[in-house]
Amino acid sequence: MNEKPIDLQESPGQILRTTRENYGISINEVTQKLFIDKRLIHDIEEDNYNNISAKVYAEGYLKSYANFLNIPATQILEIFRKNNIYDKQTNFVNINEDKIKIQNFLKDKKIYLFIGIVLIFIVTILIIFFSRFFTDKNENHLQVSQTDTSNIVELSN
């Protein structure tokens, strides 16, 4: 493999894919030599770094791939860093993830609010029921007590 000058107007993924294709190397050959998943090679060539958990890993993959193709890895990394490709994509992903987290949080809050209202309703019904039950018993008990004391008063006279 001969080194060719790098077109600095292209993205790292474009450079790697173009070079690989010019050398007639298949993606399967790249995955076997670098032990990188085929889907990840596709993502790198498309400059889609969403499936790579950290920028340092993205840079490591780019460096390995560039070295395999005899491309100066420092230039690939320079283009990658200069264009902030990883940072732009992860910021977009983080915004979407934050939006989803907020939606899930609100969804959970709605469920808790509903459960809370139902519990308050049930507790209110129980309080009303038991207050009437005990009020009725107390009134009956008072009536019985009053009749008992009136009998006692009559007996004593």
Image (cartoon, helix red, strand yellow):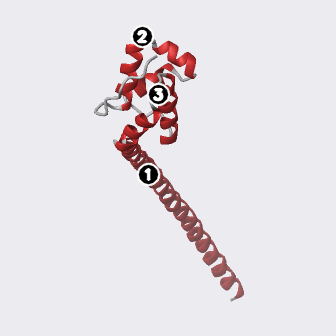
Q: From the viewer's perspective, is the residue at label 2 or at label 1 nearer? A: 2
The residue lying at 42 percent from left, 17 percent from top is 20
Residue 109: which numbered mark, if any?
Answer: 1
The residue lying at 33 percent from left, 32 percent from top is 11
Quadrant holding the C terminus: bottom right
Q: Earlier in the sequence, mark 3 or mark 1?
A: 3
> Which element type, helix, strand or loop, lies under badge 3?
helix
Q: Amino acid at mark 3?
A: Ala
Residue 102 placed where, x, y %?
Answer: 40, 49
Horizontal side of 140 relative to 153 (left or right) equals left
Which of the pair 11/46 is nearer the observer? Answer: 11
Q: Looking at the rendering, which quadrant does residue 93 occupy?
A: top left
* Residue found farthest to the right: 156
Verify CB contact (< 8 Å) between mark 2 and mark 1.
no
Residue 66: which numbered mark, if any?
Answer: 3
Verify CB contact (< 8 Å) between mark 3 and mark 2.
no
> Which element type, helix, strand or loop, lies under badge 1?
helix
Q: Amino acid at mark 2?
A: Gly
Residue 50 in the image: above or below residue 87: above
Residue 16: which numbered mark, if any?
Answer: none
Q: Residues within 10 Å of mark 2 (few under 14, many from 20)?
A: few
Q: Residues within 10 Å of mark 1 (few under 14, many from 20)?
A: few
Q: Distance of mark 2 from mark 1, alpha carbons?
A: 56 Å
Q: Amino acid at mark 1?
A: Lys
Which of the pair 3/44 is nearer the observer? Answer: 3
Which of the pair 155/113 is nearer the observer? Answer: 113
Q: Earlier in the sequence, mark 3 or mark 2?
A: 2
Residue 149 placed where, x, y %?
Answer: 66, 80
Residue picked out by circle 2: 24
Residue 33 placed where, x, y %?
Answer: 56, 18
